[in-house]
Image (spheres, helix red, strand yellow):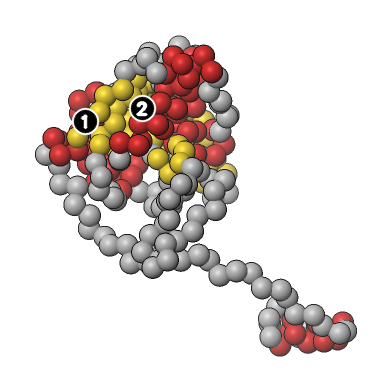
Amino acid sequence: MKILVPIKRVVDYNVKVRPLSDNSNVDLTNVKMAVNPFCEIALEEAVRLKESGKASEVIAVSVGKSESQEQLRTALALGADRATLIETDSLLEPLAIAKVLQKVVNDEKPDLIILGKQAIDGDNNQTGQMLGALLDYPQATNASEVVIDESSVKVTREIDGGLQTLELTIPAIVTTDLRLNEPRYASLPNIMKAKKKELNVISASEMDIDIDSRTELLSVELPPSREAGIVVESVDELVDKLRNEAKVIQWVYW
């Protein structure tokens, strides 16, 4: 079984992002970049499936600038067998990424595609669903457990109020949730081995795909800073404000 894992280059989640002075975008000058955490969870699950003997090959793929090779090397150090970068300088939206991944899937013919459910820089949660629609593949979102049989994959996913188990015919698409997170760390020997693993770079312009953006980023702003609360002099004043201003206390008539 071949597993394809798309990964995305994002700002490291420990970094506090700041907008540019004109609020046109996020300031990425000298900012530490990393693999999107949800994509890393997807890669962890793919490597575990390979280690259990359920998969024979794990392929990491990324769409973005040439700097994304750094994140692909990280994926190779974590256990991926080979990697492919679809290089473009354009700022791609989920639909364009899904179209590119569709082309990669048609070329690689993977049995299972595991994606992170969302990217922390966009929170769109769209690429997996769009890819499933383009490929006409069955899909399970927010997976907390993945079990592979001979011709199907059973996915336990979180829903409001409990868990739901689905059985998908292969090939299929799965997007991972936080409950699949079992952190792996790249050891120095694996980092050295990753430098020798295959990493192909393909220009997005060679794919003959329409990746033009349909949306425009108007502005980026920081959330409003939290302000100190109101100091009250007595319990009666507190109750009055809760009842008349916050309206969280109501009169009760007996």
Could you tell me which residue is drawn at 46 percent across and 47 percent down?
30
Mark 1, residue position: 202
Q: CA distance from mark 2 to mark 1?
A: 14 Å
Q: Nearer the viewer, residue 160 or 82?
A: 82
* Residue that numbered label 2 is attached to: 60
Q: How many marks?
A: 2
| Residue 17 against residue 12 in the figure, above or below | below
Q: Circle 2 — which element? A: strand
The answer, for residue 71, to whether it is visible in the render is yes
Residue 159: numbered disc: none
**What secondary structure is marked by label 1?**
strand
Viewer-nearest residue: 210 or 242: 210
Q: Quadrant of residue 98?
A: top left
Q: Which quadrant holds the N terminus?
A: top left
User: Which is more N-terminal, label 1 or label 2?
Assistant: 2
In the rendered image, residue 214, in percent from the top left (x then y), is placed at: 22, 58
Mark nearest the camera among 2 and 1 is 1
Specify the amino acid type for callout 2: Ala
